[in-house]
Each structure stands twice: as C-alpha cells, then as structure tokens.
Image (tube, helix red, strand yellow):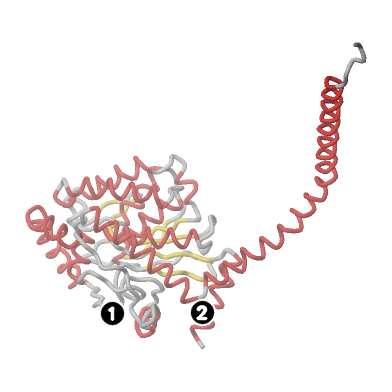
C-alpha cells in the first residue's frame, strides 16, 4: 500500500514537473550517476526546470547538469578528470586543484546563474575532528563561487589537499557527504534519491569511519600505481550481460524494499546484478578505473534507471502522455490538410490540364505531318 502511494506521488510530481533528484557521494563512480541521469532525462522524469541536490561528487554532477552540460558532455569532463588523476597518483593531495581546473574548463560561463535556486550543493561547515554543520548552498554569487562550492563539497580531508579542511566564503569547510550524505532540494513533491552504494552493504559513519577512510585512502594511493592498473584491466576485460536481481527479468523485491527502507530509490545491486565485489567498487570510488570499466559503470546506471522506471510505472505513464500529445496534434494536422487540400487539388488539376493540352497539341501536329498534301 505504501509503495502504491509513493508511486502515485511520483507520477503526480512527474506530471506537475515537481520532481527533484538527490545524489550522494560517489567519487569516480560518478559515471554510474551519468547513466541514471541520462535515462531520467530521456523519459521526461527529469524536466529542464527540475531541482537537483548533491554531496561530494554528487555535487559535481548536480553542478554540471544544472549548469547546462549534457550527459555526453559530463562523460567527457569525467574522462578528462579520470585521465589526469591516473597520471598523478589518483590525485592524492591534488584532487581539489584538478577538480577546479576541470570545472573551469568544461562549465559554461553562465553556469552559476543557471544553478541558482536549481542546484543545491551540500557542504560541511567546520572540522571533521570537531563539530560540523551541514550547509545547502544555492545562492551562487559568481562562476568562481559555484566552482568553489562544488570543489569544497568534494573536499576529502588530507586527500584533496594537504589539510583536513579548506575554506568556503571565509569559513572552514570540507566534504558535504560527511554531514549531509543524501541531500534533497527543497520544495519538490517527490525526491528521487540516487546512491552509489548497494544498501545491503555496511554503511559506516562517524569519527571512527573517518580515520578508517584516511587509512584506506593512503593504502589505495601507495598501491594504485603498481597493482591497481593491472587488476582493473583484468576486471574490465570482459563483463557478463547485465541481468536483473530477481526472476523473470524483474528486480528482487527484497532488495527494492531494503533500498526503500534506506531512503534510496536507485542504487547499484538493487535492480541489476553487480559484476564487481564491494572492495572493487569501493576502490574505484577513490582511484579511477580504466575507461572500459567507467563505461560499464555508465551502462549499469542506465540499466538500473530503466528498471526502476519500469518498476514504478514511469514508462507506461510517459507512453500515455506521448499518445495524448499525438492525439492532440492529429486534429491540428487534419485541419492543416483541409486548408491545403483545395489548393493542392487545383494545382494538380491545372497540371493535368496543361499536360493534356500539350499532349493534344503534339498529337495534332503528328497527324498533320502524316496527312497527304493532295498534290499528284
């Protein structure tokens, strides 16, 4: 019953254009998000005026999309950043600089105006070792202010730079996912929550997990240049066809319910089977995989978004809307044909008469040529 109510609310929000989208942190798993984003846009779930919110790399895709980049252009920007980080020790200690450079190179100059009151970026104000408060920023002052907000939202302590914090508008701040992992934009009727984590995986939070994260980041950095590249290539050499998590091409209802209980709509491993282990997936969030693996992440995102849309009934609704639009256009087309009809007929009739007259004249001339002159 609750699912039916949720679907009804979603369908109403789609019709009214009041759907919002939330992206949690993902690191270089952002290619999964791009696939989801592309499908939601094509299905008409995500309207041009839709509000988006994101934390960490979720803030990056929010900034890119609301700033005017298409999914294809976001893929290009993502590949540029991944390539640069592969060549620079997974951007250990330099991620903030590389992020800002990539955003400056790819965002349209008026992105900050497009994102005002449309793109909401989560920032943790304070210090990870002390009190911190979540901020949801959308009142961007300039292009530099927008890029700064997106970069600060993605600032991983001691990984993005040499400090545990950076500064935003003069105050200490760092990764927005630490204080507000799954932000939703305000004033939306339904918020589609998209996560890069399978909800069945352990969700570690708190100061203990923060120090664990730093240790994992350091380990990943030291090994990425030697063994990570070869293992990623081997994993990406061949992928099985994407399959649903349940029987008969349908998602496993238990996993869907687990995602719902975690306030997540779309996440890896819920609608399509994951061809990667949790450790592989987590490592690729910190150290960019090769292009083949990134492409498969994108395909997984598309597959999961399509399966989700089918599960909640979005395709049927969109098909009905398209049929209604076609039915509304048919009378207009018929009226145009009726208006053009007499003119078309008269032109055709005139052409026929001209052709007939020309033919008759040619026939008369031929007959005259064959007629005897009457002289002996």
- In the displayed structure image, the side of residue 342 where residue 310 appears, left or right: left
Q: Are marks 1 and 2 in contact (CB under 8 Å)?
A: no
Quadrant in which the C terminus appears: top right
- In the displayed structure image, the side of residue 169 where residue 373 appears, left or right: right
Q: Quadrant of residue 11?
A: bottom right
Name the outermost residue toward the bottom: 1
Residue at (41%, 56%) from the top-left corner? 62
Q: Quadrant of residue 8?
A: bottom right
Q: Which residue is mark 2?
A: 6
Q: Residues within 10 Å of mark 1 (few under 14, many from 20)?
A: few
Q: Position of residue 58 (x, y in %)?
A: 35, 60
Q: Callout 1: helix, strand or loop?
A: loop
357 or 294: which is nearer to us? 357
Q: Position of residue 14 (x, y in %)?
A: 56, 67
Name the outermost residue toward the front: 376
User: Looking at the picture, does residue 31 appear above or below residue 94?
Assistant: below
Residue at (35%, 52%) from the top-left corner? 150
Q: Which residue is mark 1?
A: 200
Residue at (21%, 53%) from the top-left corner? 160
Whether residue 173 can be seen here: no
């Amino acid at each position: 019953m609750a699912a039916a109510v949720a679907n009804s609310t979603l369908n109403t929000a789609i019709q009214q254009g009041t759907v919002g989208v939330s992206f949690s942190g993902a690191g270089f798993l952002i290619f999964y998000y791009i696939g989801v984003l592309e499908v939601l846009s094509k299905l008409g779930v995500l309207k041009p005026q839709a509000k988006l919110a994101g934390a960490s790399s979720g803030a990056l895709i929010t900034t890119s999309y609301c700033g005017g980049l298409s999914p294809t252009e976001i893929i290009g920007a993502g590949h540029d950043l991944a390539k640069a980080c592969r060549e620079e020790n997974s951007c250990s200690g330099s991620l903030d600089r590389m992020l800002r450079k990539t955003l400056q190179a790819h965002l349209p100059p008026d992105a900050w105006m497009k994102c005002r009151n449309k793109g909401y970026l989560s920032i943790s104000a304070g210090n990870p070792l002390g009190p911190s408060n979540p901020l949801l920023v959308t009142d961007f002052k300039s292009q530099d202010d927008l890029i700064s907000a997106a970069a600060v939202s993605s600032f991983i302590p001691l990984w993005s730079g040499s400090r545990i914090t950076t500064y935003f508008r003069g105050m200490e701040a760092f990764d927005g996912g630490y204080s507000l992992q799954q932000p939703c934009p305000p004033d939306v009727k339904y918020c589609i929550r998209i996560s890069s984590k399978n909800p069945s995986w352990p969700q570690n939070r708190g100061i203990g997990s923060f120090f664990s994260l730093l240790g994992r980041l350091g380990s990943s950095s030291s090994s990425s240049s030697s063994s990570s590249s070869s293992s990623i290539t081997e994993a990406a050499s061949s992928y099985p066809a994407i399959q649903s998590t349940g029987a008969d091409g349908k998602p496993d209802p238990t996993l869907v319910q687990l995602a719902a209980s975690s306030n997540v709509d779309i996440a890896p491993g819920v609608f399509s089977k994951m061809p990667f282990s949790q450790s592989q997936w987590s490592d690729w969030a910190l150290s960019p995989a090769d292009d083949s693996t990134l492409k498969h992440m994108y395909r997984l995102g598309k597959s999961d978004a399509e399966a989700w849309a089918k599960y909640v009934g979005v395709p049927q609704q969109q098909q009905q809307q398209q049929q209604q639009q076609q039915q509304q256009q048919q009378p207009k087309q018929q009226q145009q044909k009726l208006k053009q009809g007499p003119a078309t007929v008269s032109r055709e009739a005139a052409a026929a008469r001209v052709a007939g007259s020309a033919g008759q004249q040619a026939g008369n001339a031929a007959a005259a040529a064959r007629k005897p002159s009457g002289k002996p």
